[in-house]
Image (cartoon, helix red, strand yellow):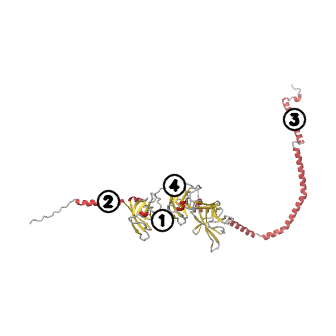
Amino acid sequence: MDEIPEAKVVIRRRPSLVWLLPLVAAFIGAWMAVKAYRATGPTITITFLSAEGLEAGQTRLRFKDVDIGRVTAINLSKDLSQVVVTAKLKKEAAGLLSKSTRFWVVRARIGNSGISGLGTLLSGAYIVMDPGPPGAEGPFQLDYKGHESAGLVTSHLPGVLVHLRAEKVGSLNIGSPVRYRQIRVGEVAGFDLDKGGRSISIMVFINAPYDALIHRNTRFWDAGALDVSLDTTGLHVQSDSFVDILLGGIAVENPMSLEDSGPMVPGQMFTLYSNRGSNKEQIFLDRHYYVLNFSESVRGLAQGSPVEYQGIKVGQVEDFRLEFHTGSLEGKIPVLIVLEPERFSVVGGKSSSTERVIEQMVQKGLRAQLKSASLLTGGMFVDLSFHPEAPRRSIGHYGKFPELPTLPSTMGAMLANMASFVERLQKLPLEEVVNQLRAALPALKETLQQAKALLTRLDQETAPQAKETLAQAQATLATLDKTLRSDSPTQQELHKALEEFAKASRSVKELADTLERNPESLIFGKGKQK
């Protein structure tokens, strides 16, 4: 029986070519996966209050109406208060993400602000992205909080964003036009409440090249409001345009004034006036409150009464009340005033805060007084003026408000002086003085009688003599006048005498000349000359 052959195992040192195919396939697959990963943009999450109109796999993200991504999932937050939208962006959109990036949903809306988003009726709602200003700094992030209200994409457009302050929004809406001489130069970008809720901050975007029109003293007013005034010439109604009245808008103007008309300061806050006429009357929203304590009558003072410095209004009275202190039961009247620093400016040095400027003025003698504004109406106002002679004081505190030192009013000071005079007058020994006067009356009466007798004697004796002397003096003056006249005999004789004297003088002079030439003629005579 043949032996069964024994298998011989041969170990190969090199891998078989059979494994090459799966390795190549794995490499290609990895390379395609890396390429696909690198070609895919980041995945971000955006939280909204509602997912109205949003659908996973359908809703798109847009920037300048260009699709840059798509919503992949919509879920509720853990506390069920919001919806979390997951979206995948294209690779080229990754560079648009920063801390200042904003997102909001565009839906079809019909309201008092107008009709918007009509295009979404066919295409569906979509999410708009605003990447923020060019070169915006901030860490790259993937989680964002969406905005519910539509905003204007202004960060990527050339121009300037201007901030306005107003007491109310009025007829303005986002997108309302801003016009300069009836030319559209920008639009309203958004609204926000200031801290404390005292005013509204309105963001206005001015497109280039019209942003060069915005100066430091540029005025803005609500063009949708009517300016109605009534005077002796009749009723006047002014408005910018009928379209602005219906839809709202803002008008811009650069008036001539004493204010610096240089370029706008970065971060400057402008005032939005209620109408065209009121832009001449400035509205000041930067307010600083102080308390004044008076112990005198404030009759005539009312809320809104002016606070003036040298006749210029710098604020007004906001509130006042009567207080009694339990210890002394002394009544005081704290008056709350508001100072508006925008009404004045500090020049010629480094700018300081309003509080610091007021503190320095108080140290130099700034005091508050009540003064009469009108004698007819009895109105009062608060006057701020310097009194260097006043005792040195500093700003105090009354509750949460700083307190300015006060002085009694002019009328109060006059009444106080009168009261002091009356008090001193009452302290005088008037009864003793009256008794002394009564005792001195007989002697005074006798003195008056003697003076009367003396005057009578003077009238009877001295007056005739004085009259006679005056007559003689008049006669003497008349004689002297006749003597000194040019046609008087005395004057003529005097002229003749002067002429004779002149002739004699000439003769003497001739004799002197002859003797000087011929001195021997004095001995021998004139005929003896040789």
- For this orientation, the residue located farthest to the top is 530
- Residue 325's place in the image compared with 205, above or below, is below
For marks 1 and 2, give the CA distance. Answer: 48 Å
Kindly identify which residue carries mark 3.
Answer: 503
Dot placed on the residue nearer the N-terminal end, 1 or 2: 2
- Residue 485's place in the image compared with 109, above or below, is above
Kindly identify which residue carries mark 1.
Answer: 110
- For this orientation, the residue located farthest to the bottom is 326
Dot placed on the residue nearer the N-terminal end, 4 or 1: 1
Residue 176 percent across, percent down from the top left: 51, 61
Residue 234 percent across, percent down from the top left: 63, 60
Q: Nearer the viewer, mark 4 or mark 2?
A: 4
Kindly identify which residue carries mark 2.
Answer: 32
Dot placed on the residue nearer the N-terminal end, 3 or 2: 2
Inspect the image, locate mark 4, and give the three-letter code of the amino acid beneath it.
Answer: Tyr
Inspect the image, locate mark 3, and give the three-letter code of the amino acid beneath it.
Answer: Lys
Dot placed on the residue nearer the N-terminal end, 4 or 2: 2
Kindly identify which residue carries mark 4.
Answer: 210
For marks 3 and 1, give the CA distance. Answer: 134 Å
- Asked if labels 2 and 4 touch by Cβ distance under 8 angstroms, the answer is no
